[in-house]
Amino acid sequence: MYEDLDRPPLHGPALARALAPDGWRVEVVPEAGSTNAVVAARAGEPEGLVVVAEEQTAGRGRLDRQWLSPPRAGLTVSMLLAETSSWVPLWAGVAVARTLRETAGLETFLKWPNDVLVDGRKIAGLLAERVGDKVVLGIGLNVTTREHELPRPDATSVLLAGGSITDRDPLLRALLRNLDAVMVERAPGGYRALCSTIGAAVSLLLPGDRVVQGTADAVDDDGRLVVDGVPYAAGDVTHLRPGG
């Protein structure tokens, strides 16, 4: 029995039935160290496997950062995809942003490559990992996370941002269906329209701890961030305020 009535458990069989016609095989587990690791261990299965953990104890984000959330406070989900384009994590960001805009009524934007922001605060993050001939895509979305539970001061949740819905079931259904639609569209313009990094003054931390500062001119057709005319395939972006 769960104690927090504001955080009811997901009903795995109902989700599995509802999303099976869309090609998703949804499994809800009480706990996982990392949903990405669980799905990666089953990469030999057909695409469409989705594992949702009610609690994740060793979640990872980009750059080996932790992604922590109280039990049932968010959506911690990983899926197995046959699509291996470098655009997968960017498309996933579009799917999350669309879901929050259409389902929760939140004005949502993206920070390159795939942080999802509301009012400049991070509400979701993504991690895509190549495993053999497939990609494991992990998404962590803060839903009912309260202020004192946030993993970092610049984070937020659907609840804190004033979202019109905090029921994880319709959010998950909308997210998976939006991801399907975005990957069919394969349209870079959809990402660019939501990316608040384009046109911003940025500081880009590159592998090897090299830092580049300049103006983010564009996201090119390979999904790279172009800063002062030079494309970068990977890096950690900070949006700089005027004078900073």
Image: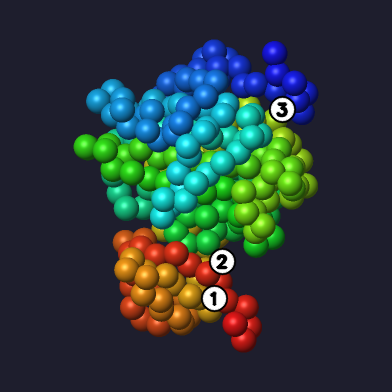
From this view, report whether residue 186 is shown above or below residue 7: below
Residue at 70% in and 18% down? 2
Residue marked by disc 3: 7
**Residue for badge 2:** 196
Q: Secondary structure at mark 1?
A: loop
**Residue 124 visible, this angle:** yes
What amino acid type is highlighted by mark number 2?
Ser
| Quadrant in which residue 122 is drawn | bottom right
Mark 2, Cα crowd under 10 Å, few <14 / some 14-19 / many 20+, is: some
Q: Amino acid at mark 1?
A: Ala
Residue 94 rendering spot, x and y as whole percentages: 51, 50
User: In front here: 100 or 114?
Assistant: 114
Q: Which mark is residue 200?
A: 1
Neighbour class for label 1 at 10 Å: few (<14), some, many (≥20)? some
Mark 2 or 3: in front is 3
Q: Earlier in the sequence, mark 3 or mark 1?
A: 3
Please state if 162 lies on the left or on the right of 138 as rendered. Answer: right
Residue at image coords 65%, 21%: 9
> Is 54 left or right of 213, judged from the image as shown?
right
Secondary structure state at the residue bearing disc 3: loop
Q: How many marks?
A: 3
x and y, in percent, of residue 16 in the image: 50, 17
Residue 218 visible (yes or no): no
In the structure shown, which secondary structural element does the residue marked by tag 2 occupy?
Answer: loop
Query: Does the CB distance between marks 2 and 1 fall below 8 Å?
Result: yes
**Residue type at mark 3?**
Arg
